[in-house]
Structure formats: C-alpha cells, structure tokens
Image (cartoon, helix red, strand yellow):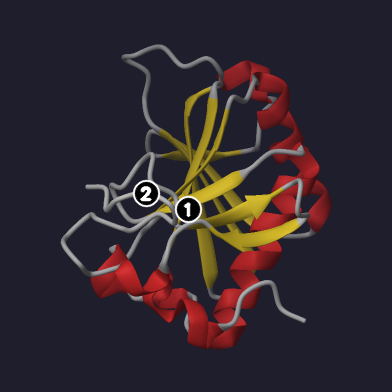
C-alpha cells in the first residue's frame, strides 16, 4: 500500500498552491551525512550532474566541498531518481541537506509514489526526518519521511493549503504563516 494517496494529498502537489519547487530538507546533518547522500547517489544507479559555478565535474568527497565559504560559487547536484524527475541538492551548509523537487514532474499517484520512495530512501540512509515545505515555507513542513514510522507521513492538513499564500494548518496548532 502506498504511503500517501493522490486523492488525499493532491493539494500538496499543486504547483499553484505550493509553488512549483517546494523545499525539502534534512536538519542537523554533518559532512558525514552529506557523504552518505553522495554514496547513495553513486551506488543507486541514478543519473546525476554535479555543477560548481558553471562547470560540471565529477562528484567529489563531501569533505572537499563542505563547509562552503560565504563567497564560494554556488554548487548544485542534480539527481534523476527516475527519468523525468529531477531533484536539485543545494550544497550550502554541512548542517542541513537542502533540495527541491519540481511538482510539475510529480503528478498523480505515480508522482506521489516516486516522491515517497525518494524521501524514504534518503531518510532510511540517514536515519533522519526528511521534511517538505511549500516553496519558501521553511520551518512549516507539510509531509515527510519519519524514521520512527519508517514511512512518509502527513505533517499538515492538505485541505489548508491555499488558505493564504505561504500558510498551512498544522494539526493541533492554529494556522501559521
């Protein structure tokens, strides 16, 4: 059985309500956690592209690129866990693994299942929560992989999306903005 059903979470996959590129993060990480992600990417068979500034190159060791000086060129690691679905990892800090997904590539039950598989694979490798927020909604997760439940779970009410730009309702709390 799928972790989440399209009919229940379609609002969390609506680019007009969530922004096309919702933010996903793993908090309280280290260079070792980033290395575990790099190792997962290398061993998974996923297609990937590492770009520092404007130059593509081989995937380095995490310790070679983290921590990043404030004036360093941007680094993006693009990963295609399945054809047609790109995940953009932003190497900004060792303390947080940040990435985004494009909701336009994750429509219908197949899209939900693809995202759940990816979040679960990453969360299990790190044994950490992997939380998704609306685009720019940092700190207010709507769904994510919960290592205690060993599955992707809802962290907000899908019906609350669209109440106001950037606001979601968290169960047990008043609306947050």
Q: x%, y% of residue 177? A: 22, 47
Relative to 143, is 37 on the left or the right? Answer: right
Q: x%, y% of residue 147? A: 74, 46
Residue that carries the numbered disc 1 in the rendered image = 132
Mark 2 neighbour class, 10 Å CA radius: few under 14, some 14 to 19, many 20 or more: few
Label 2 vs label 1, nearer the camera: 2
In this view, 5 is above or below 54:
below
Q: x%, y% of residue 100? A: 44, 52
Instruction: Tell me where residue 61 sits by quadrant.
Output: top right
Relative to 167, is 99 on the left or the right? Answer: right
Relative to 76, is 137 on the left or the right? Answer: left
Instruction: Name the residue at 78% across, 47% down.
Output: 124
Instruction: Name the residue at 69% across, 38% down.
Output: 128
Q: Say which label, 2 or 1, has the lower sequence index.
A: 1
Q: Quadrant of the N terminus?
A: bottom right
Instruction: Tell me where residue 55 sits by quadrant.
Output: top left
In this view, 19 is above or below 146:
below
Instruction: Name the residue at 65% across, 56% down.
Output: 119
Residue that carries the numbered disc 2 in the rendered image = 173
Residue found at the far right of this picture:
43
Instruction: Name the residue at 35% across, 59% down.
Output: 21
Helix, strand or loop at mark 1: strand
| Residue 68 badge | none
Instruction: Say which of 76 and 154 sits in front.
Output: 154
Relative to 143, is 116 on the left or the right? Answer: right
Instruction: Say which of 67 and 28 sits in front.
Output: 28
Residue found at the far front of this picture:
172
**Count of labels shown?**
2
Q: x%, y% of residue 29? A: 62, 25
The reply to whether residue 83 is visible in this rendering is: no
């Amino acid at each position: 059985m799928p972790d989440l059903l399209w009919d229940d979470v379609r609002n969390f996959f609506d680019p007009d309500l969530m922004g096309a590129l919702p933010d996903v993060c793993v908090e309280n990480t280290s260079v070792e956690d980033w290395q575990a992600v790099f190792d997962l990417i290398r061993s998974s068979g996923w297609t990937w592209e590492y770009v520092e500034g404007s130059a593509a190159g081989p995937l380095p060791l995490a310790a070679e690129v983290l921590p990043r000086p404030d004036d360093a060129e941007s680094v993006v690691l693009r990963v295609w866990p399945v054809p047609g679905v790109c995940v953009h990892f932003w190497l900004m800090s060792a303390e947080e693994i940040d990435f985004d997904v494009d909701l336009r590539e994750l429509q219908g039950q197949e899209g939900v299942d693809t995202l759940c598989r990816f979040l679960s694979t990453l969360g299990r490798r790190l044994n950490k929560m992997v939380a998704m927020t609306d685009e720019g909604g940092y700190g207010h997760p709507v769904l994510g992989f919960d290592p205690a439940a060993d599955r992707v779970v809802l962290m907000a009410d899908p019906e609350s999306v669209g109440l106001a730009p950037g606001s979601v309702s968290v169960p047990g709390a008043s609306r947050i903005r």
